[in-house]
Image (tube, rainbow, N blue to C red):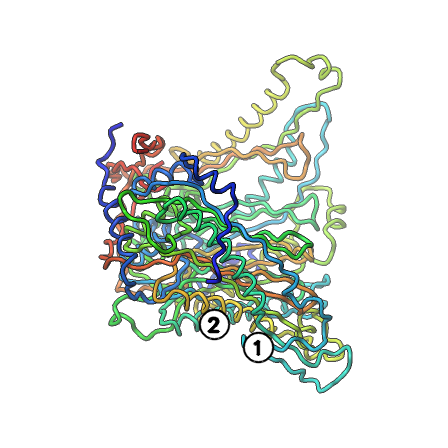
Amino acid sequence: MSGPPPPRTTLKDEVRRALESLAATPTTASGVTSDLSIDEELNLHSIGWEPVALVSGVSLHSIPFGYWNWGQGEIVAASSAFATAFTNATARLVREAGSAGGHGVVGVHIEQTVHSTHVEVTLVGTAVRPVDPGARLGRSVFASDLSGRDFTMLMVAGWEPLGLATGASFVFAPRRSMGTVLQQQSQNVELTNFTEAMYSAREAAMQRMQEAALEMQGTGVVDVKVMEGPMSFAKHAVGFIALGTVVRLAKESHQSIHPTTVVSLNDASVAFDAQSLG
Amino acid sequence: MADTPRDLPEAATRRFADGSFSSGLSVADFAACLDMGLEPVGLVQGFCAMQWGAFTMSGMGPGLNPFSGTQGGYVQNYQCPHGMVSNEHRSWGQNYQQNWIEDAWRTGFNNAYSRMMQEAQALGAHGVIGVIDSENPLADTGVVEFHLRGTAVTLRDLQAPSETPWSTFLAGQRLAKIFEAGYVPVSIVTSVASVRVWAYCVTEYLMEGTGGLFSNYGGAAEIVQVVDAQNTVRDLVRSRVRSSLHGDALHGAHLEVSVREFAKGDLELQSRLSGNRVRRFKDFDPLPVARPTVRLS
Amino acid sequence: MTNEGNDLPQATEHRLEELEHGLFTSDLSVNEFLLIKEVGFHPVGFVMGSSIYHTGIQTRKWSQSQELTKLTEAMYNARELAMTRMEEEAAELGADGVVGVRLDVNYYEWGKDAAEFIAVGTAVKAEDGISRLNKLGKPFTSDLSGQDFWTLRQTGYMPQGLVMGTCVYHIAHRGLGQTLGTTGQNVELPNFTQALYEARELAMTRMQDEATRLEATGIVGVRLEEKSHQWGSHTIEFLALGTAVTKTSDDVTLAKPTTIISLDN
């Protein structure tokens, strides 16, 4: 099968050279720890950044007893517990990153769980910084759930991440049980009370996220995710969480990335050459 | 590392005497292996079963004097602010590192690892790739089984190292990229840290959500004792790993924490950090910025 | 700035105000964000609309295959309400259109026979200041991703609106006698065939009618979804969705694509 000329002969040489060097005394790297994939690391390198250390931040905040019993409107205790837990976890993450010499944290994995008694937020990511010490400006450390690849593309386009913004709201379904309401209906119509309650809660979560973004002096929030659903321990309570990365222009204006279109010819799989088995 | 057990089962010797190889690699990984000039020579594995029960203190009832860490690890005390003494009221709490669990875990893992590497050496292998590690608790018996397996590889015309072969979790294209990026794998790294939380009154109330007599402390607040333990258990495992790197880097790290709850606020946290220890073998010119493309399907 | 004509909840007003003062939000990924900038659009804000609708009532004959027109109307109205509110939010922001529209349905345990219909997307505005509102004077909507939007613009077409057609159909239960008669044979079931055929055609036709109202030249990205919601297996909603488009320019700027073979697994 004739294919493109294999560039792999140099790979074999590289591997040989690498393994031969193992016997020699080790060169001092820097004890870098990172959970980025090699592709993400290569992307960072191409814009002059490097990983520094694996960092994390955890916070738990309590919700007093009784707040989940069916009430009316917003469950303020839950919303504020979430906001505080998230802020504290982020603060720890960012502090760890700063002490390790990082300028920001990318690829943050976010785990947030709402239990009936408390909210738990766990963040893990890799702190990164510019390779050139001269390029390291004194700025506050950012955290973002953008992958190494997304971070790179954003920077190439002239934008920079400022941090994670989140907003949450927890509400009760309206008091009057829907069953009774439905029985009184003889037509298929909109149920306005219920609509208003859910719609408002969603908007409130988004708005809190926006406010967090404005506080960071960002111009935009990208890659917003909205997670919503009833609580597993209280089905009449519904939670909405909005999360995104705050950005602003770092260069004068947006830089065009000039993408090219490609058509992949990958539907035929490349089989290995059995003759290479000694 | 502890004394390396030289006790491979007889079946292993027979399996290797055969000649043909088996490997855990997928077809694509196998092809990439050959592209790198690495030849698989066999599937290698190591087992170790460790007794766990002797090492935990969970038999002690809650609220009694907890074990005060004389092992010299992390200890943090929490005093009740209420100024009340009673049997129901936990006036004192403590977080402490359970070094004995960490030691037992390390022994079990290292035994399994060195047995796997012995098998590799018996095959004259240079390294082991695509390592998969698993721990299986055998329920109710307090026994944990460590199992490591991987594919032993050689490099033609290159002498096998006199000490233990190198190892990595990676295989296939991901391994090839490591070499291309200027790194050489040294070994897999896995480590754990274990922290026990004996709740004091404030933690207990916050986790239960009730105020009891002290409704101020049943109000909303950060659950400081648990937060300290959660953050510390991660710090501990990270420092342990970092100090074992000796200047090398840890690539493709994976950090996870499991929690066992005995009662509200009585927790056992175990963190586990694994990754590939790698070393720079060449100075590396960064690639230019990748060309963005839109794929037409 | 309040638009008295709309019925958006109070909470929305404040949020949209913040967006008008310069902050943008978008649920586009970084890739999509960069691609819509490439074609001269800028995200303005995440917009959404929802409606909780009663979807239970319709009498039906057990043994007859028929469209359940009341339910069809309900499903259509519910989605329209959600979409219209989303469009109103976009209009408030002075946007030209909404991309990446997603239509979802939520069922809540505390509300049987009712469902929440949600429409979300990212409102965008053309950076050259030229209005891109559709023939009805409203912001265009489309369920195209950022990548598809970029590609469409390269071909000289512009989205006009997300169009949909729906049909709720009841499939007759086969009588016991009929079932026994055909046991063990390979036969076409003309009842079923006819019913499903008709239902799908109705949904597609209605979708096309919407496109005609927008004076569109065509529809791209059509997909047909089938859901039973909470009605049991003999009642199915057929939903046809697509993006209506018009040609705005004869220039096709799509350069000849490069062919590649990926070296990754």
Pointer 1 and pointer 2 on the same chain = no
Between circles 1 and 2, the one closer to the viewer is 1
Rendered location of residue C211, percent (x, y): 45, 35
Give the image location of residue A257, x and y in percent. 27, 52
Q: Residue at x 63, y 68 (%)?
A: A76
Q: Which residue is mark 1?
A: B75
Q: Is residue B162 left or right of residue C74?
A: left
Residue B52 visible in the displayed image: yes
Dot 1: chain letter: B
Give x and y (percent) for residue B53: 66, 61
Categorize mark 2 by other alpha carbons within 10 Å: few (<14), some (14-19), many (20+). some
| Three-letter amino acid code at the position of disc 1 | Val
Q: Are the two marked residues, 1 and 2, in contact with CB atoms closer than 8 angstroms?
A: no
Residue B244 location, quadrant? bottom left
| Local SS, label 2 | helix
Residue C25 vs residue B26, the one in the foreground: B26
Q: Report how many numbered discs are placed on residues in the image.
A: 2
